[in-house]
Image (cartoon, rainbow, N blue to C red):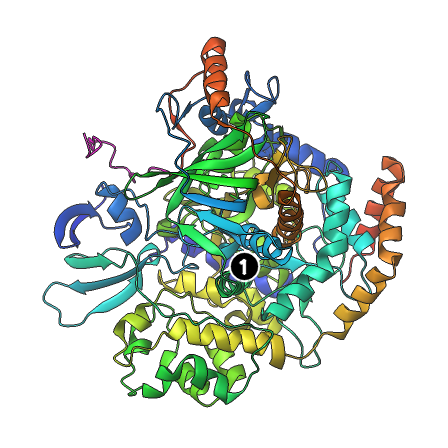
Amino acid sequence: MEEMITVYLMGKPYSVPSNLTLMDAMEYAGYKHVRGCGCRAGFCGACATIYRIKGDTEIKFCLACQTQVVENMYVAKLPFFPTQKKIYDINQIKPTEEIMMQLYPEIYNCVGCNACTKACPQSLNVMQYIAYAQRGEYAKCAQESFDCVACGLCSARCPAQITHPMVSLLARRLYGKYLAPNTQHLDDRLAEIKSGKCEADVKEIMAKPLDEIKSIYNTNNKDKEK
Amino acid sequence: MQLTQVMLDSIKKVEATRPKRKGMDIPLFSPEEKEQLLAEFHPDYRKSGFVELKVGANAGGKAPVELARLLNGTSRVYKKNINLDKIDYECDVLIIGGGGAGASAAIEALNVGAKPIIITKLRMGDANTMMAQGGIQAADKANDSPARHYVDAFGGGHFSNKPELLSQMVLQAPEAIKWLNDLGVMFDKQPDGTMITTHGGGTTRKRMHACRDYTGAEIMRVLRDEVINRGIEIVDFVSAIELILDTDGKAVGAVLQNNETGEILIAKAKTVIITTGGAGRLHYQGFPTSNHYGATADGVVMAYRAGAKLMYPDTLQYHPTGVAFPPQIVGALVTEKVRSVGAQILNIDGEAFMNPLETRDIASSSIIRECTARNKGIPTPNGYGVWLDTPLIEEIHGEGAILQKIPAMFRMYDKFGIDMRKVPILIYPTLHYQNGGIEIDKDCMSTIENLYVAGEAAGGIHGSNRLMGNSMLDIIVFGRIAGRIAGEKAKSVKIKKFTLDFVDKYQQEVEKAGVGTGVASPMIFPTYTHGNDKIQKLPIDQ
């Protein structure tokens, strides 16, 4: 028999099996999610959640789909958080320090409290990547922030009103487009495709009888790259 | 999470065989063995999982029981007297579904001068795209070619792919990578710019491009950002519940419903693109799923009711490595990349009973056989699993390789107290992908005029089995094609009078055939109770 525990969903007590995730426990209690639920696998950031264990002073942060329920948990799932996304043309901007100043000047108001880092359910060093962004070090900001799921909990906690996920997204796009090394073999293949050679090769195979294609398939499999 | 004693004992055997398995070449199954495995163990071959459709364009054909229940269900607008005259949204191209295909379509529709609107029942980007971990295929290296990519995918799909679709996909793959790269997607590269590529099941060249194991998430967040930057209107938390046709039978819009207020909204468009994704949340044959909460086949159901033909609706993909333990995340995806970088699949005795990079249908069948007919699975609270030997990855690539190559996987298990660097993980097949879907032509148009489809909702590209990394590719390539063509087409469309008469006609046929199930269709969201089946509920607005 599974153990039942009490959790307080939006402040209201429900008895739920102790082995469920918070997301599942809400459904067990009778909720049907119409927002605040997404991939249910920790990738999308839809289920940002704040909780406190009764009697504990510490406020905790998590993704509801990735967190097992605990006795006497007081839970608020954030339905939405108003973040600030600036509009830009990725082809017009350049990876300079100035672009952050223009688009997200509030990052320079960071007071170094580290509340963002403490709130991150992905255990990212959020304050550090904001520091990189302040200095225009986009490659470092991009790497440090890469696993961000944009749940927005950092922004919800920030006294300087920074929208961290949007800042790091800008840094990653700048890095991916302008700073990451160019891929020569991709350009070569695109030129080959433009010449019509690749299409001719594909068409030649398509025109073959099925048995012949099957035999090419088997030959190719024997010549599999190690 | 506490491992059972049986698991701990089995891990000792896994550790004992590891030194000898490192670097071992495990042969692929022969073509005859593969056929036998599929016939005996693949869920698509289980007759009780399917039923013959009696109504609609595929009457006489097979569909999964759970999908047929919705196709034979009751339209949410049936006998509801919907007022189609009050137009809430008007655009050139109505895009239903806010994942990777929808975003790509919207950007390209805008590029050809059309006005798109994206409708999404959750947030923009809430889609299976976000969850695609392993990678995206493209033949862009010197030892590879689009022709080889074509043959790999054609063979993987059991030679049943639509050639005119598959050829477009492989030929436009390098361009898709370039497009994403230039939008700022951070592909894994060597310092000299060479793409770091790996194998997926069924590839004969290493052409899997990745962004760590957040490939889909990285692509989706960049596309979402671009959609917003381009000023494209997004209508979120609103579900499409039925298509609207005009009196000529062309697609001209959709009936929508606000999830929270229940308000009915009408969208009018010159062309419509369905990019609603897959069906994992229908839990075919009771399987858990790796899919997004919204993957309920809404687009397939709406298009079918409006008269569209489906292709291969009876072929599903069970991803061989879904989580089998811990119970909190059963069914969640363990990316194929874990095997690409070296993890082997083992039974309770620590034996590598198969090559870890068989195509997905073969791999799943082999794992099901190991756990059932051969009784060599490891018991879990939910059933069985087999080991995926993750510590072997660090044996091969050195310490730190797991955090570098598959950080998302490490994190997912770590949250439940399992350190995959030290212990292997338990996996079992999970419902992952609908290989088939709404039939499309080379322009992505369905059999209904001006109704286009892209992404997982479409059928034919992958035949009856998709290779890893070809769906990320498919959503970009065909999303863009659908956006461009539907955008161009919109310029010459004249809309006649709106009608939902086809809904009445379809419902009458369902009733006449005696197959009506009465369930509200499309599903929109699944209902879960996690064992609390005694709960009694009534709608709160009555």
Where residue A203 appears, as percent x and y from the top left, is 86, 46
Where residue A56 appears, as percent x and y from the top left, is 13, 69
**Closer-to-camera residue (A8/A88):** A88
Where residue A102 appears, as percent x and y from the top left, is 44, 83
At 61% from the left and 40% from the top, the residue drawn is B452
Where residue B231 appears, as percent x and y from the top left, is 49, 61
Placement of the N terminus of chain B among the 4 image quadrants: bottom left
Main SS of residues in magenta = loop
Helix, strand or loop at mark 1? helix
Is B540 located above or below residue A181 in the figure?
above
At 48% from the left and 81% from the top, the residue drawn is A141
Is B314 located above or below residue A106 in the figure?
above
- Which residue in the structure is indicated by mark 1? B216
Question: In the figure, residue B538 lies in which quadrant?
Answer: top left
Q: Residues within 10 Å of mark 1 (few under 14, many from 20)?
A: many
> Tag 1: residue type?
Gly
At 27% from the left and 43% from the top, the residue drawn is A27
Placement of the C terminus of chain B among the 4 image quadrants: top left
Question: In the figure, residue A156 lies in which quadrant?
Answer: bottom left
Is B21 located above or below residue B358 in the figure?
below
Count of numbered badges drawn on the protein: 1
**Closer-to-camera residue (A41/B390):** A41
Span colored in magenta = B526-542
At 54% from the left and 35% from the top, the residue drawn is B252
Based on the picture, tell me whether residue B541 belongs to the magenta stretch. yes
Based on the picture, tell me whether residue B529 belongs to the magenta stretch. yes
Residue B304 appears in the rendering: yes
Residue B420 appears in the rendering: no
